[in-house]
Each structure stands twice: as C-alpha cells, then as structure tokens.
Image: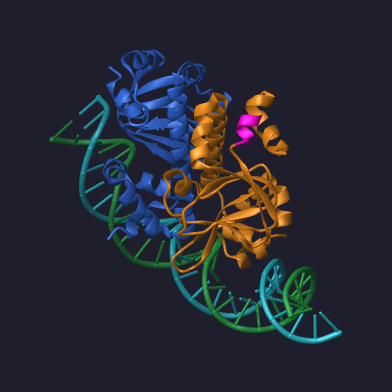
Chain colours: A blue, B orange, C green, D cyan
Amino acid sequence: MHQKLREHIEKIVPLTDDEFKFVSSHFTTKKFRKHQFLVQEGEPVKYHHFVVSGLLKLVYTDDNSREHIVSFAMEDWWESDFYAYYTQTKATMSLVCLEDTEVLCLSLEDYRKLCDGLQKMERFFLEKANFGFLGAQRRIISWLTSNVKERYEQLIRQYPALIQRVPKSLIAAYLGVSRETLSRLSP
Amino acid sequence: MHQKLREHIEKIVPLTDDEFKFVSSHFTTKKFRKHQFLVQEGEPVKYHHFVVSGLLKLVYTDDNSREHIVSFAMEDWWESDFYAYYTQTKATMSLVCLEDTEVLCLSLEDYRKLCDGLQKMERFFLEKANFGFLGAQRRIISWLTSNVKERYEQLIRQYPALIQRVPKSLIAAYLGVSRETLSRLSP
DNA sequence: GCCGTAATGTGATCTGGATCACATCAAAAT
DNA sequence: ATTTTGATGTGATCCAGATCACATTACGGC
C-alpha cells in the first residue's frame, strides 16, 4: 500500500521504514471514475493529489466558456489548483478525470505537518517545486520560440505516452491551438 | 549591509541576528553596469542572484538569433538560468543588465549549505519556489486565454513600474509579439 | 445491435499579428 | 555640436492559424 508513493519520494530522498510510515499516515486514498471532478472551479480546494494511476486534466474555463488545459497529470504526478490550495481560496480551475483514477490526497494542514515533522519531506517538496517551476518555464520558452507545429513535436517528444491516451482536441486545448489546425499538421 | 536581503527573507521566515549572520555569510555582493552579463549562454552558471537594485533581463536566443525575454528581474527578485545552475550544466540563456545593478550571489554549494544548516532557509526557498511556479503558471494561463492586447494590459496591471523602465521592444519580446504590433495597440 | 454523442478530417473563408520598409525623435558617444 | 545609435510610430502587404460548415468514423450506454 502506498508503495508507489514511497518509490516516488525515494527517487529524491531515501526514507527509513518508520519515516515512511509517518509520511504515509498523512495521505488518504481516493478513487474516481472518468468525468468526475477532484477540484471544482468556485469551490475550496481541500487536497493536493499524488496520482497513483489514471489520467487527469487541469482546466481553466475563460469568460467565453472555452476550456483551456493548464496541465495534464499522469501516474507519479502531483496536481491540484495549487494556488487555491496553497492560499486556501476558491478554485479558479477544475481538475477532472480523463480516465478512472486513483490518487493519494494530502491536505494543506498535513502538508505543513509533513514539512515540519520530517526535514527530508521539505527537501522533497523543494525539489519538486523547483522542477515544477522549470517545467513551466520550459513551456513558456517553447511558446516564445516556436510555432504550433514545433510545439506539437516537442510535446510528442517529451510525453509520447500522453498523445496515445488523450483526444487530439484536448492536446489542442493544451497547446493553445484550434483542433482543426492541429488536425491539419499531423502528417 | 545585506539589510534588503534580511527584510526580504523575513517576509517569509523571521530570523535571529545570529541566524541572519549565518545566512549573510554565504552571499557575496557584486556590482554590474548596464549591458554587462551575469550569465552567458554556453558558460557554466556559478550563482543564483538576489537583486538588491537595478534591472535585468533573462534572454533566450533562438536558432534565428531572435531574442526572447524569458523574464525580467527587478529589486527583491531572484534570477539566474536556474536550470543550468541547479543541474550544473551550461547556460542556455543569458542574464543581462538593463540598468546598473547590484546583486547578492549564492553558489549552489552555499545554497545547499544554507538549506542543510538552517531549516528556516529551506522553508524560505520552498515558499519562493512554489510562488515562482505559480507565477509561471499564471503566465501560461494568460497566454492560453488572452490575445496580445489583453496580455499587455495584464502585464501593465501586474508590473506597472516595469513598463516605465523598459523599452517597448523588450516588452514585446517578453509578450511574444512583434514590436510593431505592440506599438499599434497602445491607445 | 442500435442510437446518440464524441473524435477526427477537410474545405472555404476570414483575420490578428508578422514582416518589410521608412520616417521621426531622443539620447549617447565622440 | 555633430554623429551615431536606439526607441518608437505607421503604412502596405503577407500568412499562420482561427472560424464556420459539413462529412465520416468510432464508441459508450442501454
């Protein structure tokens, strides 16, 4: 149980059995079916989520009720409306299952307790946050320097598995293109 | 000396005099003139920089030698080619002064020592990293949802001071538009 | 096995923003 | 004071990608 979490954390900081028991006790398992919401725009955000299995989309809906995909989340990823979670405000985005999904949930209170109770976990989260920032910066650079086709090719190179599991229309909503344009540049 | 740094850190974690003395001992002050490089593409990245005064641009130059502005850095900001710094690889971006600038430099070794030696500093960097990620995510959302004019207006709202200090052509390079288009939509 | 809905492809047309080309004005540099 | 360099504005033209419209195929639900 929670074995995937342990492996995930130990890629960054090794843990003793007791330490992992302590860590593990702060998480609760939840299962969701395709189309269910883990976070709903306008509602408070109780948890940060570690994805054990399945696939999620983090969606921002604009004033014209167009859906934009801020992020996907697959196995081993952490996802939430992190701003709303971290500042305990209402969600501006929704986190929705694209497949049946199992997550480990961590409340902000438990996140704090983990950081305070075990310095290794603070180190772990720092490492995650730094690489999360770098990933976002990489996406910004991709946007600044490349056209749609190039950005699509970069995405395929970076996450080949994702393309197989997600409809093209959602890939388009992630890249910030119309699905028609994306459809036309595949060959 | 380093008073600005102390105030900056204490917005997040309070420090005793001794603790700050410890922190402070890991930084070195450097001064640069307009047009000088703190980080040069292709070179190793020795330091992360806390900006005491002045203004910098973080620039990515693409294959067609077009310059894209990944970020600006003003007083109280931290800036570097963070990926190259963190992974000790060669810089893919350059960090250049737009004004005469004073920074406090922190080597990766000292960054690690700070985190190990004083848990409060690890907390501080975690907080910075989380908000850094959220800032980048916000920019991505702005890009997904808004056209050039709206993104420009959002930038003005978020950093009104910046617009006064930076030529429009660089604002354009940050927004990912041509300077001609930016020039046309001001009124 | 049938039906409604989602995913995908493709044509025709439109448009926001890029590009090219100059002109003007401000500010360094000598 | 004069030259050089950088910042900005603006017209004319072009094009990547959006939008609209419709056809085809795949698929989950009953």
Q: Decide: is A77 above or below C30.
A: above
- Position in image of residue B111 (x %, y %): 52, 37
Q: Is residue B179 visible?
A: yes
Q: Which quarter of the figure has residue B118?
A: top right
- Position in image of residue B63 (x %, y %): 43, 66
The answer to whether A86 appears left or right of A24 in the picture is right
Q: How many marks?
A: 0
Is A32 in front, or is A17?
A: A17
Is B36 in front, or is D7?
A: B36
Name the residue located 44 percent from the left edge and 41 percent from the top edge.
A69
The answer to whether A161 appears left or right of A80 in the picture is left
Q: Is residue A53 magenta?
A: no
- Position in image of residue C1 (x %, y %): 13, 35
Is A36 in front, or is B77?
A: B77
* Dominant secondary structure of the residues highlighted in magenta in the image: helix
Q: Quadrant of the C terminus of chain B?
A: bottom right
- Position in image of residue D26 (x %, y %): 21, 44
Q: Which residues are magenta?
A: B21-25
Q: Quadrant of the N terminus of chain B?
A: top right
Q: Is residue A91 visible?
A: no
The answer to whether A134 appears left or right of B73 in the picture is left
Q: Which quarter of the figure has residue A100?
A: top left
The answer to whether B43 appears left or right of A152 in the picture is right
Q: Decide: is B18 above or below A110.
A: below
